[in-house]
Each structure stands twice: as structure tokens, then as C-alpha cells.
Amino acid sequence: MALSSIAGQRRAVGFLKRVLEKETVPHAFLFSGMAGSGKLAAALEFARALNCLSPRDHDACGSCGSCHKLEEGLHPDVVHVKSDGASIKVEQIRELVKRFRFRPFEGKFRVVIIHDAHKMMELAANAILKILEEPPEANIFILLTLESQMLLPTIVSRCCQVRFQPLDDRIVAQWLVSQKGLLAPSAEAIARLAEGSLEKAGWFCGQDQTEGWKKVVERLESLATLSILDLFPMVSDWAKGRETVERDLEFIKLWVRDLILYRVAGARSPAEGTAGNGPALTFELHGKTREAAGSVPAEHLFILYQRVELAMQGLKVNANLQMCLEGLCLAIKDLLYGKGHWNSFSKRGQAL
Ligand SMILES: [Zn+2]
């Protein structure tokens, strides 16, 4: 791997490559962008190019001793500062300063990577500021953060700013196929959920998430036959964790999107793969859901999509979790499965 192999960050990588072509390298950089957009990978590749023993086209060769050590995480001149608990503490910066008494051990530069720089406590931030004001020779600092506004303006003004964009869905999907072994339709679906973050994409394709995903679909499909009296306890059980429900709403949005694609574009099921033309669905549509999606007026599905978005916005402003889910489940029951499926008797009631 080399700096030029960082995917989807052409501007940021182009800037860093131009820096490497120059005689002098600025002493501090601020890499900002969402988690999982490639900031750390770029910082490591930049460090590798800076210390490479036989650079090619101003980039790391990937085969010299220095490149190998860095790849294995064993390079003595690449120093990571990470939060200790919830924050980066001043003691950690004091420890760092002790290293500056010595020149880099092996490389031309010591590269200090400060992860989640916004987690620096006030004293730590002031200590870093002092270092950046009088930078020790042959040391390069790379601060990683989500948003530059999260840092002291005095720190930001002393760094070269490099912004990382959310990754294109296509790049996230390719990564899921090559690194996680997913099939293309699933990778494309997860890429849409990940909103440009490899970290989020990796999280979504974890085993727990796949199970969660299946459970959401089961619950949605159960609405076709669930009586109104059974719907409320089901939702009450579902609405136990805000974070889980927020994630589930992402799945619901994707599911409704599938219904629309099936209804208006004749989309194929995921099992049919990528063969042929037209879009593939993310989820398999079964029984009553498939039937309903094929016959319900398309406008109902568009309204449903808006309802999911409204529920998502509601949760962001702290709306009542249970009410949000109840409203949405009732809307699905009404708009998708139709009023004919209303049944005021609970299954338990019928059994008695
Ligand atoms: Zn090299």
C-alpha cells in the first residue's frame, strides 16, 4: 500500500503528495473528517513516505526496511497518542515531550499521530499548542479529528488542514467485497447505510448487526397478521434502547426503499444476484409482504418512506421512542397491508 492507494480521497491525497515533492515539510497537519473516512490510513502512509529509504515518485516504496517496520506497526519513529479513557491527558503530552530530547532513532522524521485530537483536555491542548508554537526539529505532528471546529482555533491555525470527505458508496461497497467477503448486493446495501464510513460499514456487517437486521424484518413482516392488541406489546418490547431503535430505523428505511423498488421498478430479489438489468433488493420479500408490495398503490409506499424519515428526525430531537415506533408500525400496517388486515382481537383472546 502507498499514499496513492488510499481510495476515495483524491484531493487530500493529492495535497499530501504535493507536500512530499517539496524540499521542506510543514511540521503540523490537521486531518479532519468522519470516522472511517481514511484519515489514519493516510497518516500512516504519509509517515511511511516521509521515512521511506528509497521512495518512488515521492511515495513509499513498500519494500524497504523502514516501510516494512511501519506496516507491521514496529517503526520506532511513529508515535501514537490515543485517549486514556475518555480523554487525552496532559501527562500523556508530558511523556511525549520527553522524546523530543532525542532525534528520531532511525527515520528522517518522527511522526506523532494524535488520534481523536478533540479529546484533549484543556491542559493537554495547551501543552500541544506550546509544542506547535516552537516545534522540535525533525518532528511532524498529525492531529486526527472529526471536525476542525472541535479544536482550539489557535491549534487549528498552526496546522496545515487536510479535509477528508465521506467515501463514495461505490468505494465502501468495493471494500466490503474485497475485505469482508460480502456478495455485491449485500455490500451495496450496507454501503448505503454506512454513509461514507468504512468504520460504520464494518460495524453493520458484523454478526450482531446481521442478526439485528433479520429480527427487524421479521417484526415488520409480522405486522401483516398481528392484531392491534398484540402490536402494542411488540412495540413496547422493541422500544427498549434508543440506540438500537435508531439503527433499526435505518434498516426500516432500506426495507421501505426495497418495497418501492419492487413496486415501481420491478427490482429483483437479492438471491437473483447482480445478473440482468435493473436494481436488486436488499432484503428478500416473503409471502404477504411480497404480495402487498406488488399490489398496493405506489403512493402509499412513498408516504411510508416519508413516515420513516419523520420518525428518524423525531428521534434526533428526543421524541418519545415508543410513540415514534408505534406510529410507524401502525402506518406500515395501514398503508402496506391495508385496512383489511386490522383485527381487534388478540391471538391470545381468540385462543381463549
Ligand atoms: Zn520504502
Image (cartoon, helix red, strand yellow):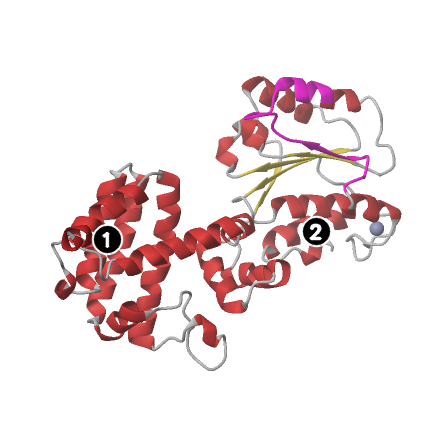
Q: Secondary structure at mark 1?
A: helix
Ligand 1 under 8 Å from disc 1 Cβ: no
Task: Give how far across and how far down residue 342 sits, in percent.
Answer: 14, 59
Relative to 24, 288 lies left or right: left
Q: Residue at x 36, y 38 (%)?
A: 241
Kindly indicate the quadrant of the structure image that contains residue 43.
Answer: top right
Q: Residue at x 37, y 50 (%)?
A: 248
Q: Secondary structure at mark 2?
A: helix
Q: Residue at x 61, y 45 (%)?
A: 39
Q: Which residue is mark 2?
A: 18
The part of the chain drawn in magenta is 73-95
Residue type, numbered disc 2: Arg
Q: Which residue is mark 1?
A: 329
84 magenta-colored:
yes
Relative to 328, 352 lies left or right: left
Kindly indicate the quadrant of the structure image that contains residue 84.
Answer: top right
Task: Give how far across and how far down residue 135 sits, in percent.
Answer: 72, 27
